[in-house]
Image (cartoon, rainbow, N blue to C red):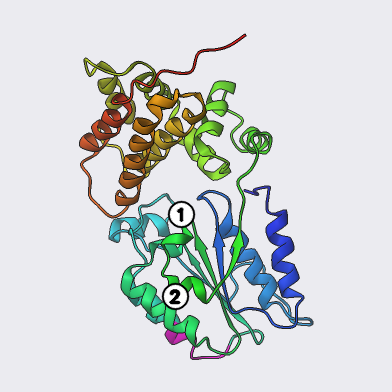
Amino acid sequence: MTFVGHEGSWDQWRAALAGERMHHGWILAGKRGLGKGAFAVAAARELVAEAGVVQPKGLHPDVIVLTNLPKDDKAEKLRDEGKAYEVKRNIGVDQIRMVQHRLTTRPTLGSRRVVVIDSADDLEKAAANAILKSLEEPPAGTFFLLVAHRHGRLLPTIRSRCRLLPFAGLPDADMLSVLQREAPQADGSTCAAAIAAASGSPGAALEFVELDLGNLHSVMEAIVERGDPDLALRSKLTDAMGTRPDRKRQLAALELARAVLAGRMGRTEPAALPALAQSYADLVRLANQAPTYNYDPGLLVMEIGGLLASLGVPTAPAHG
């Protein structure tokens, strides 16, 4: 899959590549689903390529990609079979140490090697401290590309040793083009809801379509619009989530709820804005905690529904 919207990031990267001295550490920052990981691998291949040296078309021995490992033996088996599998929540320190050991040898094909960490948000504390040591004293010819969906959560010492390469969200027209190309089965209303929920992230919009979150989005909008005094809509929300939603669906629901509230900011009467802002902040807190806490799915969806129902936000009356 090819995402659009990387032109500015490529311009910055290639300008640095053409300079006299390439910085050894980079943070590729932007929302999840913008294609930063694919960009990082492509950029890494450009960085290690040398004139007169044939570059492999498949995996490159001098581009090391570090990401979350399979969750367990069952997930590892699914990965080996080329099937979808669950991953561990964090990138562990042992993974970093294995890479650091590899960095004691010379690159295979040329004089440069790149370590891609996708995503650096998932580095556990010990792993983050370990990679910091490599950033402080990088081996000769070694470069680091850290993919970050929320780069402000990285250690300040890591951020201070890296250049920032920002990735902007896409405008709605480009988002629609991606959906029409990659998900032609999605109807107009589904595309519109996916674009509204994804906030400029084509990957998030495609995930929205893949997870079939249209009904969930409709129920959330109804709860915010009307409230839910008899819990009937929260019951529908639970049904729309499914009996045993996996972690991916839970996180997507949290992002969707945040998008629903964000979309109402400009349509809400001033008196109701403090309550709306508080509910939004609570959803942000839940979204930050969910990747590391084992929330009961049923309780999580009721918590989301409760935050939405607490608003009863009146929309500003139309004029003219």
Q: Is residue 104 magenta?
A: yes
- Which residue is depicted at the point 48% across and 84% down? 136
Decide which of tag 2 and tag 1 comes sooner along the chain. Answer: 1
Q: Which mark is residue 82?
A: 1
In the figure, residue 140 lies in which quadrant? bottom right
For mark 1, does the 10 Å Cα neighbourhood hold few (<14), some (14 to 19), or many (20 or more) residues?
Answer: few
Span highlighted in magenta in the image: 100-106
83 vs 287, left or right, is right
- Which residue is depicted at the point 70% across and 83% down? 21
Q: Is residue 301 magenta?
A: no
- Which residue is depicted at the point 75% across and 69% down? 15
Q: Which mark is residue 131?
A: none
Judge whether residue 212 can be spotted in this image: no
Residue closest to the eye, 98 or 122:
122
Residue 81: x, y in percent? Answer: 42, 55
Q: Residue furthest front?
A: 271
253 vs 197, left or right, is left
Q: Compared to 31, does 205 lie above or below?
A: above
Give the SS element for disc 1.
Answer: loop
- Figure quadrant of the C terminus: top right
For mark 2, does the 10 Å Cα neighbourhood hold few (<14), some (14 to 19), or many (20 or more) residues?
Answer: few
Residue to which mark 2 is pinned: 157
Q: CA distance from mark 2 to mark 1?
A: 38 Å
